[in-house]
Amino acid sequence: MAVPEKLAALRHLLAERFPTAPRAASRLLATGISAVDAATGGLPFGAITELVCTAPSCGSHLFLQQLLIATRRERLRVALIDRSDSFDPDSCPADLLAHLLWVRCLATALALQATDLLARDANLGLVFLDLRRAPEADLRRIPGPHWYRLQRAIEPADLALVIATPRASVPSAQLRFCLAVSHAPTGFAVERPVLATELSPALQRQRLPVLAAG
């Protein structure tokens, strides 16, 4: 079976096992990360948030884990498109993985195809595309219009899309945060929940649409 057919089969299976749940009235996902929630109130549904990770060991995995906690709390399902097969499920509590669809890709083109498919799935509340280790040449080859098509695709699905990149690469991102400070070596001896409270992604862009009054 070809890769697109496998992804389509996964989407069908997900829809059968997890019927679409009603959305909360709010269009923001509170992350539990103080710097994010204080700056923007959370991540917007129907929009792209870019997480630029310019330093090694800067906390991108902690950021993802906090999103897993937040979506678990809101009973939302998550898809992780892992471009470099770098996600370590053993580092997360098992209950945080129960609502996670993990798509492992070893090519940027495949990761983008998977994202395009899953970003249209109303059964999901969050899609996280990890391009942190994508080759620079791959990132340069992604045409700008691709990101705008992806933005249009997620709007009717009403999900939050987070794209982690090694440099600012997503022109259609409505929010952009940057993690630019590596954890000190002593941080590896600190419990993850404590480290998560120290995450301080800097807001670089906020271009949110005006929401109609309820």
Image (cartoon, grey):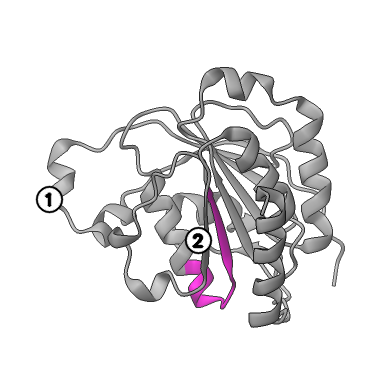
Q: Quadrant of the C terminus?
A: bottom right
Classify residue 189 as left or right of residue 20: left
Residue drawn 25% across and 38% down? 183
Residue drawn 16% across and 53% down? 190
Q: Quadrant of the N terminus?
A: bottom right
Which residues fall within the magenta stretch?
A: 70-81
Q: Secondary structure at mark 1?
A: helix
- The answer to which of marks 2 and 1 sits earlier in the sequence is 2
Q: Which residue is mark 2?
A: 31
User: Whole-percent x and y of residue 199?
Assistant: 36, 47
User: Whole-percent x and y of residue 192?
Assistant: 25, 57
Q: Marks 2 and 1, Cα distance to the nearest angstrom?
A: 24 Å
Residues at circles 2 and 1 in contact by the CB criterion of under 8 Å:
no
User: Whole-percent x and y of residue 197?
Assistant: 32, 56
Q: Is residue 18 visible?
A: no
Classify residue 93 as left or right of residue 212: left
Depth check, mark 2 against mark 1: the one in front is: 1
The amino acid type of the residue labelled 1 equals Ala
Residue drawn 72% across and 60% down? 8
Which residue is outermost to the front?
1
Looking at the image, which is closer to me, 197 or 100? 100
Q: Which residue is mark 1?
A: 189
The amino acid type of the residue labelled 2 equals Thr
Query: In the image, is residue 76 part of the stretch drawn in magenta?
Result: yes
Looking at the image, which is closer to me, 68 or 203? 68
Residue drawn 73% across and 40% down? 207
Q: Is residue 37 visible?
A: yes
Q: Quadrant of residue 33?
A: bottom left
Crowdedness near tag 2: few (<14), some (14–19) or many (≥20) residues, C-alpha within 10 Å? many
Query: In the image, is residue 142 part of the stretch drawn in magenta?
Result: no
